[in-house]
């Protein structure tokens, strides 16, 4: 959450900072600001609202002039999203200017100490504590000051600092919050994510935890927390800048929905060879797979819904017991993890704070960590024993779509690989599943053609205030995701329930006209789910049934039908999720919501 940019070079800093912030606005958009060194002092312009509001303020007050600067787009944690709490913040008598992502956990005790030393606070943020603390430690040696700050604070952070008496330098550091350094020619860059600098350079350093970067226009030097210089390989970005642009679509979400056929194809193609699953990134041998005790799947949000689906598929095919945990709960329940267990960690960004903490917890107890990650060389990827990249490319919309689909297909691959290693499926069944999976991109292309139908369907339900989703087994997992998509971008109250649980209290919420999405694609559970559809229909619900094209039993009870092509039951989630994404998109549009930047949310959740 929150985005940092920095520039030092020979060009005007303000346009570059603003351009970078626009690329990072998915990380936070409560407020924004930039700071530029004018040759003598650091000027700041900041405001609540979005980058457009910052641009307007700069237009009204005049652009900041200078060739060195830092910028920030905020997702509020400490203090309301207003002008005062917006970054950058000043430290001491104004000689320090600082931006920060993350949370300083011991900020209260540090604030008390600094107030006793005579420092005055004007904001409610923990970031101002960091700015004053840097000033407290600074005696002319910026590296020494940063090292002392890092040894004093507890929490997660990425930070960048300008110092009045060091006009040719930006110093930055990271711990548990991503930060990259872009390498230019007589100019260098700083950012929370690659899209912010991709217009200017394809070469960068990916900072590790507890590393410091000192940037001048001619050089980049990297250090550890103890001020020892470190050397890193240059990471070269291979994907195109267009991948992080809208490409003619009205919204990133719509573009990313449309990219799902390619995403699924790119995820599967290298890992299915001659009708066999071959996951080169997975170093587990057949013997090690046979000896797996329990698979612990940890994730947050939509990735957790992938984990729910993965559990059903892995247990069905490979007969390995799976536990699925919300990453934010995993380490606090003192999980029982044994050395022959594996932990499957799912994260789009590879920087999700709770998921990273869960990974570390599992590894500390002896489990092997296998991650499913989209962002190459992210922290979770680097700290895993094995990492399987999802090949989705940059996903900018806050509501995930294509990354979800890619993660889901990696889960299928793992389930088949485990089942084959254990001798639970033979060559013929593996061949059949692989052939069906390779058909998924083509089938998803056909589902995208339902756009007009789903747009009209959304018009019928756009004024709903409460929507329910029900399903059993894998259909329940996709019901969870359909409900989340709807609530996070349209702000409609929506809940998903295992259909069999309705009668245990939830059905009391169903009243005349309540929309209920019934996902019913699992053949062995269809009759049971039809019974639950009848239950809600008898209480006045308006039922939208999401079924396979050969399933006609729900026609008698449903008010509306969404049909998807037939495929093996375990692969159905890859199909059923697509119309639910499109429906949510049009519901949000119909209610005038900002589809790509829903309120109170950010794309990369790097705080607990």
Image: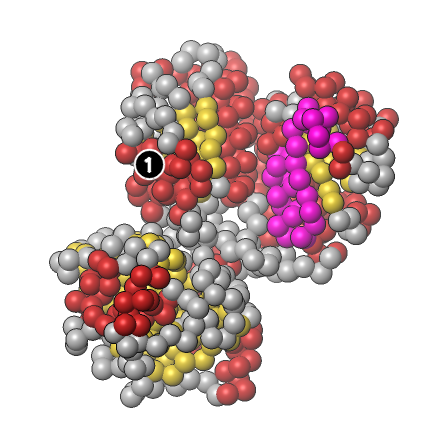
Q: In front: 396, or 308?
A: 308
Residue pictured at 78% horizontal, 40% vertical: 515
Q: Is residue 487 magenta?
A: yes
Residue pictured at 35% horizontal, 37% vertical: 359
Q: In front: 284, or 362?
A: 362
Q: Which residue is mark 1?
A: 361
Principal secondary structure, stretch drawn in magenta: helix
Q: Residue 501 in the image: x percent, y percent?
A: 67, 26
Question: For residue 151, what is the image quadrant?
Answer: bottom left
Q: Is residue 247 magenta?
A: no
Task: Please indicate, yes or no, whether residue 457 appears anywhere in the rendered image.
Answer: yes
Residue extending furthest toward the left = 228
Question: For residue 445, what is the image quadrant?
Answer: top right
Q: In front: 94, or 158?
A: 94
Q: Residue 567 in the image: x percent, y percent?
A: 64, 25
Q: Is residue 569 above or below residue 558?
A: above
Question: For residue 50, what is the image quadrant?
Answer: bottom right
Residue pictured at 61% horizontal, 43% vertical: 484
Q: Residue 59 in the image: x percent, y percent?
A: 53, 84
- Is 458 placed left or right of 63 in the picture? right
- Is 408 placed left or right of 386 in the picture? right
Q: Which residues are magenta?
A: 478-507
């Amino acid at each position: 959450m929150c985005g940092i940019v920095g520039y030092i070079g020979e060009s005007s800093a303000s346009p570059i900072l603003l351009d970078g912030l626009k690329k990072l606005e998915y990380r936070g958009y409560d407020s924004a600001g930039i700071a530029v060194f004018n040759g003598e002092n650091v000027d700041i312009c900041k405001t609540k609202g979005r980058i457009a509001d910052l641009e307007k303020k700069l237009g009204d007050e005049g652009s900041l002039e200078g060739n060195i600067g830092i910028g920030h787009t905020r997702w509020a944690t400490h203090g309301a999203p207003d002008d005062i709490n917006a970054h950058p913040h000043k430290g001491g008598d104004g000689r320090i200017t600082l931006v920060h992502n993350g949370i300083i956990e011991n900020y209260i005790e540090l604030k008390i100490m600094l107030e006793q030393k005579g420092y005055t606070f004007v904001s409610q943020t923990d970031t101002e504590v960091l700015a004053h603390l840097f000033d407290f430690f600074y005696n002319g040696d910026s590296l020494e000051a940063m090292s002392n700050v890092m040894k004093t604070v507890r929490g997660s952070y990425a930070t960048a600092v300008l110092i009045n008496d060091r006009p040719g330098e930006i110093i930055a550091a990271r711990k548990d919050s991503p930060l990259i350094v872009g390498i230019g020619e007589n100019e260098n860059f700083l950012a929370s994510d690659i899209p912010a600098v991709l217009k200017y350079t394809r070469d960068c350093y990916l900072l590790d935890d507890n590393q410091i970067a000192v940037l001048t226009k001619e050089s980049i030097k990297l250090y550890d927390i103890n001020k020892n210089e470190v050397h890193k390989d240059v990471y070269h970005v291979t994907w195109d800048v267009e991948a992080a642009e809208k490409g003619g679509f009205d919204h990133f979400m719509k573009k990313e929905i449309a990219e799902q056929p390619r995403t699924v194809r790119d995820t599967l193609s290298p890992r299915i060879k001659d009708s066999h699953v071959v996951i080169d990134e997975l170093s587990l041998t057949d013997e090690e797979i046979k000896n797996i005790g329990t698979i612990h799947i940890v994730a947050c949000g939509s990735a957790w819904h992938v984990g729910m689906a993965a559990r059903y598929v892995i247990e069905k095919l490979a007969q390995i017991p799976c536990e699925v945990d919300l990453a934010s709960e995993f380490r606090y329940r003192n999980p029982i993890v044994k050395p022959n267990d594996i932990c499957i960690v799912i994260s789009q960004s590879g920087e999700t704070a709770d998921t990273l903490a869960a990974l570390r917890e599992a590894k500390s107890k002896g489990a092997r960590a296998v991650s499913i990650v989209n962002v190459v060389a992210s922290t979770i990827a680097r700290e895993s024993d094995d990492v399987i990249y999802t090949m989705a490319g940059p996903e900018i919309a806050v509501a995930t779509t294509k990354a979800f689909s890619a993660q889901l297909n990696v889960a299928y691959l793992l389930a088949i690989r485990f089942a084959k290693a254990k001798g639970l499926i033979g060559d013929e069944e593996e061949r059949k599943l692989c052939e069906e999976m390779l058909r998924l991109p083509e089938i998803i292309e056909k589902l995208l053609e339902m756009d007009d139908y789903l747009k009209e369907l959304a018009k019928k339900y756009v004024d709903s205030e409460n929507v329910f989703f029900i399903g059993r087994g894998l259909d329940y997992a996709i019901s969870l995701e359909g409900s989340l998509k709807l609530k996070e971008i349209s702000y409609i109250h929506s809940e998903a329930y295992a259909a069999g649980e309705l009668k245990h209290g939830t059905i009391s919420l169903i009243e005349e006209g309540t929309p209920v999405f019934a996902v019913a694609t699992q053949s062995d559970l269809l009759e049971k789910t039809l019974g639950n559809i009848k239950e809600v229909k008898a209480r006045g619900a308006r039922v939208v049934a999401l079924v396979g094209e050969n399933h006609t039993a729900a026609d008698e009870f449903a008010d509306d039908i969404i049909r998807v092509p037939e495929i093996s039951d375990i692969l159905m989630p890859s199909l059923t999720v697509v119309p639910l994404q499109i429906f949510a998109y049009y519901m949000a549009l119909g209610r005038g919501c900002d589809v790509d930047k829903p309120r109170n949310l950010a794309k990369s959740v790097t705080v607990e």
